[in-house]
Image (cartoon, rainbow, N blue to C red):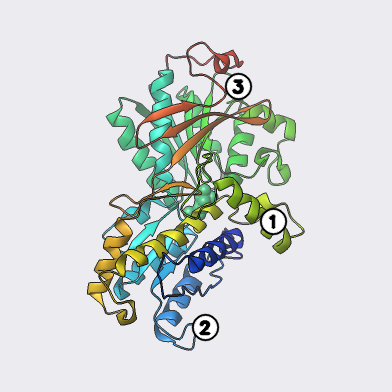
Amino acid sequence: MFPQAGEWAGGEAAFPAAIKALDQINQREDILPGYYLNLSAYDTRCSAGLGTTILYELLYNKTFGNVNSSILMLLGPACSPVSTAVGEAAKMWNLIVLSYGSSSPALSNRARFHTFFRTHPPATLHNPTRIKFFELFGWKRIAILIQTEEVWQSTAENLEVLARKHNVHIAVRQLFDNDPSHAISNLQKDDIRIIVGLFYEEKARKVFCKAYQQKYFGESYVWWLVGWYADNWFLKIDDIDCTADEMSRAVEGHFTTEIQMLTDSTTRTISGLTAREFITDLNSTLKQLFPNKPVESVGGYVESPLAYDATWALALALNRSLGRANLEEWSYGNVNMKEIMMDDMKKTDFFGVSGAVKFDELGNRMSKIVVEQLRNGYYHRLARFDAEKGSIEWLNNEGPDGSRCWNYKHNYSSSY
Ligand SMILES: CC1(C)CO[C@@H](CC(=O)O)CN1
């Protein structure tokens, strides 16, 4: 399932990446020998209803698409709302679902999504990084500003649980639906200085425009946002009543956390390619497919390594199951074979273009998180955090031990 439109057209780049993996897999004699993996792709348009309809047709309509047999596994969906609908239904047909693009923490509920796995980590994976930095900088009093959407509210709940375990006090938790003015006034009244902002890009512009207008910005405030907004997101002023200069001043100095989806490593991956070789090849394909836009703005470009690695993960799991299951006997009622394939999915452990690929007990994939800071309008990569080891790797800036990152103009107070 590869959305080509809708809230997030993540399938635009993910589909070519998955096809590349499939072609490489089908040429490998050592993977699924004697079998040819066939991929039937459908545009879900990021719609839960359409995704469910496609699943139903795949299950019951043998003439649907070019599928004239039962499908072995489902690659996708991309968008969280579609994964929520499809992932919950698929288990009733013993169908394993492997998403490459869904970040909703709700999808970690194993009871609801028993056969669901994802190479895209949940949004909650940002939280250990945030806590690590709060401890590093001695920030004890934090606020969370939350857009009323499930993905952000469940991320906030997870952050509060972690904060309590690490003696960080969540002093204020402010929710807003469309207009953040009242919430920002409350943060100001409580003299909050460290704010974790959990909202989509369009709301981020409203937050910082209001913050500017209410003079709630500058060197004494530290904002933590997600790092996957579009480049120069704060300069798109057509939907706010602030100038680009006002927005630049309001957002200056904020930190972001982002899942690292393409490894920096030069190690050869399971496919034999390095990550650099993979992305170079994908870029040339995307330039042909989307000649009128830069590759970085093709939907799902950042997540495409996750789709590539997800295709490898499915093929490797099926390959492992060959020893214990006869794939010709697969049918949606074959619980025994579903259990075998579930076991083999849980054994996933390979080095892909997105880094180490393995799933935890909730079907989630762990990744590294990159921390950046906006300085004079440009994002600087500060550090990479390994949530599994709890370790920080400083990138071209040393740590807070009196090095360059402290030369920056913000005088962070350690009393908050
Ligand atoms: C980092 C982002 C943009 C978060 O949303 C994901 C889509 C979703 O969870 O619906 C895709 N990747």
Residue at the spot 60% in from the left edge and 49% down from the top edge? 277
Location of residue 357 in the rendering, given as x and y in whole percent from the top left corner: 40, 50
Asked whether the residues under the numbered discs 1 and 3 touch, taking CB atoms below 8 Å apart as contact, a structural biologist would say no
Q: Nearer the viewer, mark 3 or mark 2?
A: 2
Classed neighbour count for the residue bearing mark 3: other residues with Cα under 10 Å, few (<14), some (14–19), many (≥20): some
Give the amino acid at mark 2: Asn
In the rendered view, would you say 159 is above or below 345?
Answer: above
Disc number for residue 218: 3
Disc number for residue 395: none
Judging depth in this view, the residue of 247 and 54 nearest the camera is: 54
In the rendered view, would you say 140 is above or below 151?
Answer: above
SS category of the residue bearing label 1: helix
Point out the residue furthest to the bottom here: 63
Judging depth in this view, the residue of 292 and 88 nearest the camera is: 292
Name the residue beneath numbered marker 2.
66
Quadrant hosting residue 227: top right
Location of residue 213 in the rendering, given as x and y in whole percent from the top left corner: 64, 30
Q: From the viewer's perspective, tell me whether residue 237 is left or right of residue 81.
A: right
Classed neighbour count for the residue bearing mark 2: other residues with Cα under 10 Å, few (<14), some (14–19), many (≥20): few
Q: Earlier in the sequence, mark 3 or mark 2?
A: 2
Give the amino acid at mark 3: Gly
Q: CA distance from mark 1 to mark 3?
A: 42 Å
Q: CA distance from mark 1 to mark 2?
A: 28 Å
Point out the residue furthest to the right here: 292
Give the amino acid at mark 1: Ser
Disc number for residue 284: 1
Ligand 1 near label 1 (Cβ, under 8 Å)?
no
